[in-house]
Amino acid sequence: MSEDATGFPEPSTEPLVVLQDVNKHFGDLHVLQDINLTVHRGEVVVVIGPSGSGKSTLCRTINRLETYESGSITIGGETLPEEGKALAKLRADVGMVFQSFNLFAHKTILENVTLGPTKVRGTNKADAKKRAMELLDRVGVAHQAAKYPAQLSGGQQQRVAIARSLAMEPTVMLFDEPTSALDPEMINEVLDVMVQLAQSGMTMIVVTHEMGFARKAADRVVFMADGAILEQNTPEEFFTNPQTDRAKDFLGKIL
Ligand code: ADP
Ligand code: MG
């Protein structure tokens, strides 16, 4: 993989996640409106936009936690399965990290990370444990492996949640405001792990208002408002030269 001047690998030109004319309603609310989005293998796409614009719904739809009414979504060229084993595999291939860490409270940190690979992937316990310890080390919490989630800080728990997703060897990682429930002093330790992940070449779709992360790690910023994608551009262009009034207004409020 080639690297650009900043040390981040250049994304490939291979489309990995492709949404075409995706539409979804919640009752009368047209929450996703003709969404067209292509994320290439190795690309880091940051999705930003006002609260209620459909960012979480977009992530949940890509992961099939929500259905959609028209259009198509493919991952690695395959249409999203509706149910059954194929859907379980899709969920394993598409890692998702939420605002709330959702760790299993009655399992240790290590068990939280080994559970998916042993149950869903059929990995043997020794291999799953070895891999889990490597991942916990990578996110800086290996020394906490025997503890329970409640014994860890929010930032540590979110890093475990990232390790747990990575243990499934996903082809793409979705992050939905992964730092917005954290105390300010813990935000950077989670963002640092995400930056490292971006540098390792992981394909990532990240909903966040952390502009520092977007500037550092994003190949592209996608701006959503009222269920539609209004702009897509490099972070430099988007932040310095937003094209729509909605984006200018939004940036004026958060920058
Ligand atoms: P964002 O993540 O950008 O804040 P969401 O995707 O969470 O936006 O929500 C988009 C809109 O859809 C909001 O108006 C929200 O109230 C609505 N919405 C989200 N989930 C549901 C649901 N399960 N049922 C009905 N409306 C929903
Ligand atoms: Mg949201």
Image: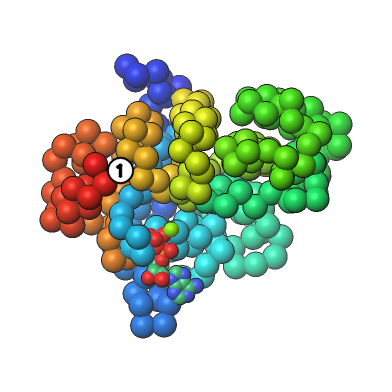
Residue 3 placement (x, y as % from top left) = 39, 19
Residue with the mark numbered 1: 221
In the picture provided, is 147 more to the left or to the right than 33? right
Residue 31 found in image quarter: bottom left
Residue 139 found in image quarter: top right
Mark 1 residue type: Val
Residue 209 placement (x, y as % from top left) = 36, 45
Decide: is 131 above or below 109: above
In the picture provided, is 154 more to the left or to the right than 146? left
> Residue at position x 13%, y 56% from top?
245
In the structure shown, which secondary structural element does the residue marked by tag 1 occupy?
strand
**Where ligand 1 lies, by image quadrant?**
bottom left
* Front residue of this view, candidates 183 and 194: 183
> Residue at position x 35%, y 19% from top?
6
* Front residue of this view, candidates 79 and 26: 26
Instruction: Looking at this view, name the residue that lies furthest to the bottom.
Output: 28
Residue 51 placement (x, y as % from top left) = 35, 60
Q: Residues within 10 Å of mark 1 (few under 14, many from 20)?
A: many
> Residue at position x 24%, y 42% from top?
255
In the picture provided, is 61 more to the left or to the right than 222? right
